[in-house]
Image (spheres, rainbow, N blue to C red):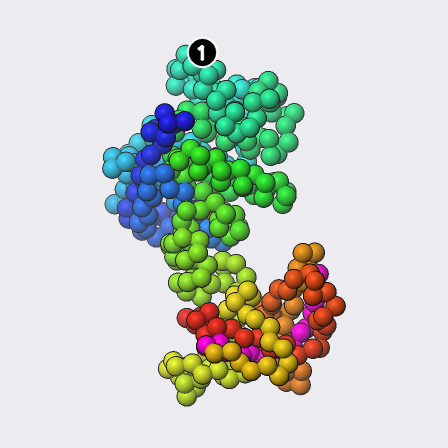
Amino acid sequence: MSGRATAADTAIQVIGCGKTFGGGTVALEPTDLSIAAGETVVLLGPSGCGKTTMLRIIAGLESPDPGGRVLFGGEDVTPLPIERRNIGMVFQSYALFPNMSVAENVAYGLRVRGVGRARRRAEAAEALALCRIADLAERRIDQLSGGQRQRVALARALAARPRALLLDEPLTALDASLREHLRGEIDALLRRLGITAVYVTHDQAEAMTIADRVVVMRKGGIAQSGSPQEVYFRPADRFVAEFVGLMNRIDGRLRDGAFDGPAGRLPLPAPDRPDAALFFRPEAARILAPGATCPAGMAVLQFTIARVQFLGDRQRLILEAGGPQDAAPAAGARPVVQVDADNRGTFAPGQPLMLAVATDDLLMF
Ligand SMILES: Nc1ncnc2c1ncn2[C@@H]1O[C@H](COP(=O)(O)OP(=O)(O)O)[C@@H](O)[C@H]1O
Ligand SMILES: [Mg+2]
């Protein structure tokens, strides 16, 4: 595979690229993004935040507003159309030719470039093997499942030995179990090839699995860029905190060096503020036995169990802030914690629940 790796080690730089569409829609504010050679960057964000626009600018399917530039391996490719950038693309809709066989689809791009027949066959066979669909080579596209079609699209994108692979929600059209399986395979493949890859998704679990680096986007800009762990444990702002993973939120106010909320009063050295919100991950919370004292370095929060959800391997406790008497109607999503399945029967609605959270794991923005 070393021949592939050399073709694939292209760094990508997006410099001051914005995009305003006709009618004045700003899809992307002027944005910088540097992608190292061989790095897998995932653009993650809600629908409409500009992920596809960013990807299409990198691909050369869209030109940035004046002033924006795109570099591949230090070379300015801004004026080059997609066919001269040598990138592979995979879309949510497979965009395959239904009247051609799998092998013909995969070899198509090579044929367009005038690659000879023997080499076309060899390259296509290798790409099919990489995507574990060598046995499907002679099938017609309409004889394939959705997962198999997406493997064909991936093999087609890889066959021409692109400098970078760009994927736009490649798994969104597939059902949940297949999506999880294929995302593992794509992750393994990207690692094996060491190819520079930009992967767009709105699914945070998918992003965390595949990314070397997650770039969280919001409203045409970058909200945070960091490793999956950084984005998860040290979200830059409220938006990232609530978008990535399960996050509990308690609204209250800061007064006299303490946070006052429906789950209790916690010492918190911060300036007074009438509308503060405290965040913590469900797994950061430890359930305290009734009457237990607060462990050092932790804060105690008082809840009532509102509902117990059965998740198979786990149970999710949906909580209301406050003790049984003063449980306030929750504004927005209720806090949750998850417990192992062997706790079945231990928890019931109406019970008080005391949580201890390390003060380091309490986030405020
Ligand atoms: N060709 C276009 N013309 C006008 N507006 C567009 C066009 N493409 C995208 N947009 C708008 O730009 C914004 C960002 O779109 P997009 O990049 O597709 O977001 P995402 O991929 O994150 O869902 C959206 O508001 C979308 O409606
Ligand atoms: Mg999109």
**Residue 302 is inside the magenta segment:** yes
Q: Main secondary structure of the magenta part?
A: strand
Res 277 seen here: no
Image location (x, y in percent) of residue 271:
37, 82
Amino acid type, label 1: Ala
The residue at the far right in this view is 345
The residue at the far bottom in this view is 256
Image location (x, y in percent) of residue 273:
41, 81
Quarter of the image that includes the N terminus: top left
345 horizontally vs 251: left or right: right
**Residue 26 is inside the magenta segment:** no
Against 270, residue 234 (above or below) is above
Against 340, residue 114 (above or below) is above
Against 222, residue 355 (above or below) is below
In depth, the one of 144 and 99 nearer the eye is 144
In depth, the one of 2 and 253 nearer the eye is 2
Which residue position is annotated with label 1?
Answer: 118
Q: Residue at x 54, y 41 (%)?
A: 184
Quadrant of the image occupied by residue 113: top left
341 horizontally vs 277: left or right: right
Q: Residue at x 46, y 51 (%)?
A: 44
Circle 1: element type: helix
Image location (x, y in percent) of residue 138:
59, 18
Image location (x, y in percent) of residue 257:
41, 85
Q: Residue at x 42, y 51 (%)?
A: 214
272 horizontally vs 151: left or right: left
Mark 1 Cα-neighbour bin, 10 Å: few <14, some 14–19, many ≥20? few
Tell me the magenta residue range.
297-310
